[in-house]
Amino acid sequence: LEAFAIATGAVVRHQELGRDGISSLIDQVESEEVVWDVVLIPTEAVLPIAQQTHLSAIDYNVVDDADLYPELLMQHGVGARLYSTVMVYAAQLETAPRGWEDFWNLDLFGGTRSLRRWPVGTLEFALLADGVASADLYPLDTARAFASLDRIRDATQFYEDGKSPVEFVRTGQAGLASAWSVRTALPDVVSLVKPQWNGGMIAADSWVIPRGAPNTDVAMSFVNFATRAVPTANYTRLQNFGPVNQNALTLLRSDIVAGLPNAPENLSRQFFQNWAYWAENLESLTAQFEDWLFNPLASPTAEG
């Protein structure tokens, strides 16, 4: 933000979004009292909000997309930072788990499992564990996914706080867990907990511009600036998110790149979350997931 202000002379004010940020964005647009020019939101929220006509279209004549990952280019949003949900395990393990098949193998790797209480990612990992190739995941075979989860239900604790899974593995409360990759690089866990990139799910946060923003032109220029190689590399040096500009990787030390979800050798072993699929199915599959979690005798069928 400071670099953009210096480069352009624009006056930039920053506000933390908070838990009610998306609701506030929608309220501002619907009341025609928009005070935010650019907002950083989870990418899975972009399409649903855009479908309500609450976002301005991205002007790709202003935002240079040549070096950005194509998966992060949307009509109403542009990727801002990358992260992955990966399997994590204790660094002290003599043999590292190779993928989600090993996560599901309670005989080979003992101990409690920990998965996010959320269908996004959890269902994909269940299918990977059951032998589905990452290229064939979508549309999800939900009946098969829940049947796969049935196999480890009794050995699994489901978390809601993003800090929990790494802490569970670090302290031995869980043998294996799914977790955000950025948390494996924190100073107090980096030597104790390791990520397994095989079968990881790449996700992102994105820049969006509310419809009716008071400074749309400046906002579009900011999105372009914020997705250039140098600013994205600088941000990665501060936080272990992957830069959305592919040229940024060449500006970073090799040891930093090695821990990023879009390091070439890590990227090739993962898949991108299908945001369009989840925009259409999140509500219904969240209800199915919660029903499965609290009603062990009734796994969802293919019909839902």
Image: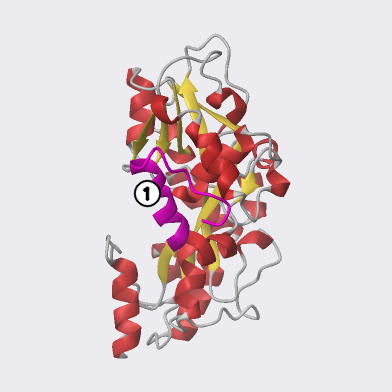
Q: Is 21 above or below relative to 195?
A: below
Give the amino acid at mark 1: Glu
> Looking at the picture, how far across and down is residue 265, in whole percent?
69, 36
Please tell me in which quadrant of the rendered image residue 65 appears.
bottom right
Inspect the magenta stretch and tell me whether residue 296 lies in it: yes
> Looking at the picture, how far across and down is residue 150, in whole percent?
48, 34
Looking at the image, which residue is at 40% across and 70% down? 39
Q: Nearer the viewer, residue 247 or 199?
A: 199
Looking at the image, can residue 68 be seen? Answer: no
Q: Is residue 139 left or right of residue 120?
A: right
Inspect the magenta stretch and tell me whether residue 101 lies in it: no
Q: Is residue 146 left or right of residue 168?
A: right
Looking at the image, can residue 178 be seen? Answer: yes
Q: Residue furthest top?
A: 94
> Looking at the picture, how far across and down is residue 181, in whole percent?
48, 38
Q: Is residue 179 left or right of residue 26?
A: right
Q: Quadrant of the N terminus?
A: bottom left
Q: Is 75 above or below relative to 176?
A: below
Please tell me in which quadrant of the rendered image residue 128 appears.
top right
Looking at the image, which residue is at 56% across and 13% down? 108
Give the class, few, some or many, for how many residues have Cα within 10 Å of label 1's Cα (few <14, many ≥20): few
Looking at the image, which residue is at 47% across and 72% down? 48
SS type, badge 1: helix
Query: What residue is disc 1 on?
Result: 290
| Start-end of magenta stretch | 283-304
Looking at the image, which residue is at 66% across and 48% down? 137
Q: Is 245 above or below relative to 56?
A: above
> Looking at the picture, how far across and down is residue 207, in whole percent?
48, 67
